[in-house]
Image (cartoon, grey):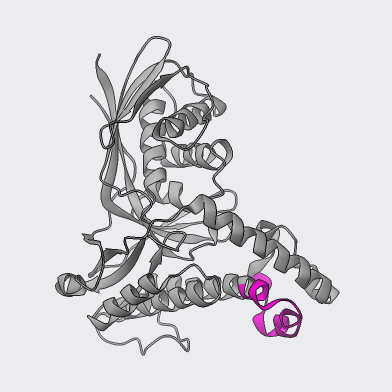
């Protein structure tokens, strides 16, 4: 048995506009220097896969559908997705090893799918461009595995760096940069499931939009839809909506307010990342050599408050880590991922990174921005 291809893909931090990709809104991802590596070789008739982390192993016929959400099911989904995209699938042997912790908010499943889909597409003569592999990984997770995610994780892993991802066609990606800072990931020790959290929030958002459509006048209704991914979110004005939001249940109104405020604050952060000074009530005065880090940190902390107060996906443990990181000198901090567990990501200067740790987290990492999908023929 000979391995012919080695592919690796990074985990990611859910940087800006969390819980917005499945609504068709743009998001910002940070690829990190924790990676998943997949080695692939040819095998006659069957696919045989093994996780070097857990020891889980299995074999299946190419095209067999997943039956659950195990490691082997993810590999099955990647193979089936490549078949749908026209890759000439055959047998394979696969070994996977990962540094990305599972269920932590660092997109371990996306790193797995991107690395596996990239390795197998290269092995079988398919495309290996980040856009192709990212979409194949997305289809594997969303459509084949049935996990209600958006495109943030797969595109963030495949493209790498700090990526501004347009989650509506043509799914283009803009590369951004933020110099002078590092990210500290603080593990709450709580585990969560995206597959449990996303459907509930999506259902509440649909209920809220249905109620708002019933309460609002035609000039507002024309911007709305009961399908949250079809709403013209960018055109909605919070002040204009206020009297109609007050007429619907508060929890449902909060889901809509969250979406609007989260997106508006992300647009401000993008201006800062592009080198422009902006003003907002939650922003400090942007001065000094580190003004961009100050601004982005303040947006992160503001977005955590929205996730806590309007989307109800934080926990006391996550809130304590955010507050602790800021008290130790972080520019800002927020939860990363679906919430209700996982990690808090803090932005800090390199000199402050170590002092932010030791505030009650189960584990911590100092992380740097990393490149995306890498493929090597052996």
The answer to whether any part of residue 150 appears in the image is: no
147 left or right, relative to 94 = right
How many marks on residues? 0
The answer to whether any part of residue 99 appears in the image is: yes
Question: Which of the 4 image quarters holds residue 251?
Answer: bottom right
Q: For the C terminus, which image quadrant?
A: top left
Q: 290 or 326: nearer the eye? A: 326
Q: Residue at x 81, y 76 (%)?
A: 215
Residue 355 percent across, percent down from the top left: 16, 74
Residue 177 lies within the magenta run: no
Residue 244 lies within the magenta run: yes
Question: Which of the 4 image quarters holds residue 205?
Answer: bottom right
Q: 50 or 2: nearer the eye? A: 50
199 left or right, relative to 179 = right
Figure check: 340 above or below 113: below
Q: Residue at x 49, y 32 (%)?
A: 77
Q: For the N terminus, which image quadrant?
A: top left
Residue at the outermost top position: 44
Q: Write down the region rendered in magenta.
A: 234-254
């Amino acid at each position: 048995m000979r391995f012919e291809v080695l592919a690796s893909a990074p985990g990611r931090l859910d940087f800006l506009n969390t819980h917005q990709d499945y609504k068709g809104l743009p998001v910002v991802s940070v690829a990190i220097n924790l990676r998943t590596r997949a080695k692939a070789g040819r095998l006659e008739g069957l696919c045989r896969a093994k996780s070097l982390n857990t020891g889980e192993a299995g074999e299946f016929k190419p095209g067999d559908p997943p039956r659950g959400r195990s490691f082997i099911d993810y590999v099955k989904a990647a193979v089936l997705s490549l078949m749908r995209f026209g890759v000439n699938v055959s047998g394979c042997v696969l070994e996977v090893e990962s540094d990305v912790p599972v269920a932590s908010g660092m997109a371990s499943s996306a790193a797995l799918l991107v690395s596996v889909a990239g390795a197998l597409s290269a092995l079988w003569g398919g495309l290996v461009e980040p856009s192709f592999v990212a979409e194949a990984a997305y289809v594997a997770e969303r459509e084949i595995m049935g996990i209600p995610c958006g495109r943030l994780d797969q595109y963030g892993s495949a493209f790498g760096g700090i990526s501004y991802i347009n989650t509506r066609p043509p799914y283009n990606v803009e590369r951004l940069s933020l110099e002078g800072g590092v990210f500290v990931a603080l593990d709450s020790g709580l585990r969560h499931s995206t597959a449990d959290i996303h459907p509930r929030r999506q259902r509440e958002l649909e209920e809220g939009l249905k109620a708002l459509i019933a309460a609002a006048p035609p000039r507002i209704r024309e911007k709305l839809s009961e399908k949250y991914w079809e709403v013209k979110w960018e055109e909605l004005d919070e002040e204009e909506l206020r009297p109609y939001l007050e007429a619907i249940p508060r929890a449902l109104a909060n889901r809509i307010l969250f979406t609007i405020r989260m997106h508006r604050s992300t647009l401000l952060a993008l201006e800062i990342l592009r080198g422009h000074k902006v003003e907002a009530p939650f922003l400090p005065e942007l001065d000094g050599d580190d003004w961009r880090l100050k601004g982005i940190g303040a947006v992160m902390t503001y977005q955590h408050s929205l996730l806590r107060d309007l989307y109800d996906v934080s926990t006391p443990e996550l809130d304590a880590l955010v507050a602790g990181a800021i008290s130790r000198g972080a520019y800002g901090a927020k939860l990363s991922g679906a919430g209700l567990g996982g990690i808090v990501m803090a932005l800090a200067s390199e000199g402050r990174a170590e002092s932010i740790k030791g505030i009650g987290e189960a584990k911590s990492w100092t992380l740097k921005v990393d490149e995306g999908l890498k493929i090597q023929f052996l």
